[in-house]
Image: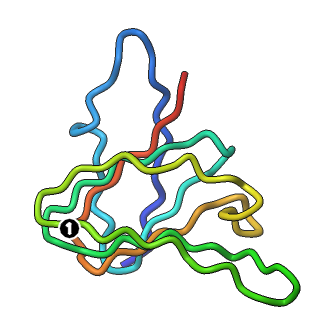
Amino acid sequence: MAKVTLEVQASSLAGFEPDEEAVAIGDTGAEFENDGETLLEVVAVTACTLTVVTPREIEDLAVEDKAYVMTLAERRIIGPFPTKTFNDSGGLVQITSTQEDTTLVAFKKG
């Protein structure tokens, strides 16, 4: 299965339905284009650990990935993700989960 690419939604006064935009992370993870202002809504359908990869190194030492331990049916908003720490060379943030049914919605202020 290919990695899931999340479309970053823009919030507005009219709003949007996060549940309609939610995408399951699958077994290969997900990614999104990050400008440093993007937030993620995460829903742990099953208890899981969600990991946001930090490809950054300081003085040849890797910056530790950011892990979120989530309980069954927990809903959480995480981010924003500073580009210097979280963006890979393509400007994307990489995310993995221990459960394939974890759902994600990427959004930012419109």
Question: Which sits in the foreground, 32 or 38?
Answer: 38
Q: Is residue 4 left or right of residue 49?
A: right
Quadrant of residue 37 within the rendered picture: top right
Question: Which quadrant of the structure image shows residue 101?
Answer: bottom left
Quarter the C terminus occupies: top right
Q: Give the quadrant of residue 15.
A: top left
Residue under the image location 55 percent in, 42 percent down: 38
Residue at image location 70% in from the left, 68% down from the top: 88
Question: Can you give x and y, in whole percent of width and height, for residue 93 in the image?
Answer: 59, 62
Q: For the view shown, which residue lies furthest in the bottom direction?
A: 60
Image coords of residue 54 (percent x, y) = 63, 73
Q: Nearer the viewer, residue 67 or 1?
A: 67
Three-letter residue code for mark 1: Asp
Q: Nearer the viewer, residue 60 or 40?
A: 60
Q: Where residue 44 appears, x then y in whole percent?
A: 20, 62
Instruction: Give how far across and how far down residue 50 sits, in percent.
Output: 36, 70
- Name the residue rendered at 23%, 37% in the picture: 20
For disc 1, the marked residue is: 101
Quarter of the image containing the N terminus? bottom left
